[in-house]
Image (cartoon, rainbow, N blue to C red):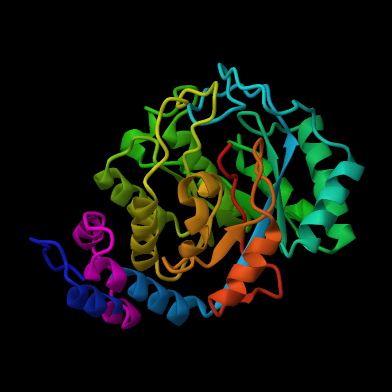
Amino acid sequence: MSETVTSLPCAQDIARWAEDIIAGRSLSSPQARSLLDLEPGSEAVAALYAAAQQVRDHFLGNTVHFCSILNAKAGNCSENCSYCSQAAGSTNVDYSKTKWLDAEDIVDAARSAAENGAKALGLVAAWKGVKAGAQLDMICESIRQLVAQGNIRPDVNLGILESQEVANRLQQAGAAVYGHNLETARSFFDQTCSSHSFEERWETIQYIKNSGMGLCSGGIIGMGESKDQRVEFAEQLRFIEPQMIPINFLNPLEGTGYEDRQPVDTDEALITLAMLRLFLPERNIMVAGGKEVTFGERLHEVFAAGVNAVMVGNYLTTLGTDPDYWHKQVANYGLELAGAAGTGCGRGNK
């Protein structure tokens, strides 16, 4: 769809756009941008949510994926990402710093995640990126242990990859999906981090895709990016085609570079999710870190906005929602929990 948008779309426009998407036409960037200016509570927003559910159900059915993450190496990160409590320069002390966890801790975490309904566990490390040698050997052994355990799919989120060889080693060890977020629009990235570049992240994504691992890549909403940049971010996601897109919402934790920022408005966040569903109709979209802070008692409404995946359990340094809540909400919305491993889990907000 390449039509020019000169005014805010009405409910009828949005319903027609949904039919066009189902017929195989893509939502244009101007159309996506116009959705972000809709008035909360309006008939147009109600139509947007209906369209998001219609498009989700058509392309992805009524199945919801649960994924979990484990902070397998916490704290002392060299990178200065402004949103992260583990970053260089952060003074946040609300978590315990660790070296790479031993096998028993990782296996126990996998067992707990599986009991909560998660089909994948992402092993996450706070560093710039995994290095070839003893460090990579250690991680590959952890992956093999999870494969042997057999009750959950092992995913990894280990930062920037230094070479294609490292990516290939992880895939050969049994890592099914590599999580590596773009985090935000290319034009905004330098305002969130200066210790590595957007281009380094982009190169890592190419290594992941070339290795045969699945790609899980999304980002964080509410860091100060403009609405235009949210559409730019969506365009980048459309280009790289991740199997899973984790959408985090800024949780302005004490001691981080963004501690003074306000969480994104709930309605604004829901409208953004629904826009992403129409712009990326065939992609799994997961709500991840910061969702409790952003949505509060309206947390369940993410399903109305077209989401089909949830990060369950705790995050890297903060607590998540009781998994029982999500089981109940899946049923309340007439959805079903996936019975087999899905297609990725993300890093989550810190």
Identify the residue at horizontal 69%, vertical 59% (top origin): 323
| Spot occupied by residue 163 in the image (x, y as percentages of width and height) | 61, 38
Q: Quadrant of residue 263?
A: top left
The image shows residue 98, relative to residue 295, as above or below, that is above
Identify the residue at horizontal 79%, vertical 40% (top origin): 139
Q: Is residue 59 left or right of residue 39?
A: right
Specify the quadrant that holds the N terminus: bottom left
- Nearer to me, 69 or 153: 69
Specify the quadrant that holds the C terminus: top right
Q: Which residues are magenta?
A: 19-47
Identify the residue at horizontal 47%, vertical 62% (top origin): 302
| Residue at the left extreme, as displayed | 6
- Nearer to me, 128 or 137: 128
The image shows residue 222, relative to residue 242, as above or below, that is above
Q: Residue 326 colored magenta?
A: no
Q: Could you tell me if residue 245 is visible in this image?
A: no
| Spot occupied by residue 316 in the image (x, y as percentages of width and height) | 66, 39
| Spot occupied by residue 83 in the image (x, y as percentages of width and height) | 49, 31
Q: Quadrant of residue 56?
A: bottom left
| Residue at the front extreme, as displayed | 297
The image shows residue 200, relative to residue 211, as above or below, that is above
- Nearer to me, 7 or 265: 265
Q: Is residue 325 left or right of residue 89?
A: right
Q: Is residue 119 left or right of residue 163?
A: right
Q: Residue 42 colored magenta?
A: yes
| Spot occupied by residue 5 in the image (x, y as percentages of width and height) | 12, 63
The image shows residue 112, relative to residue 60, as above or below, that is above
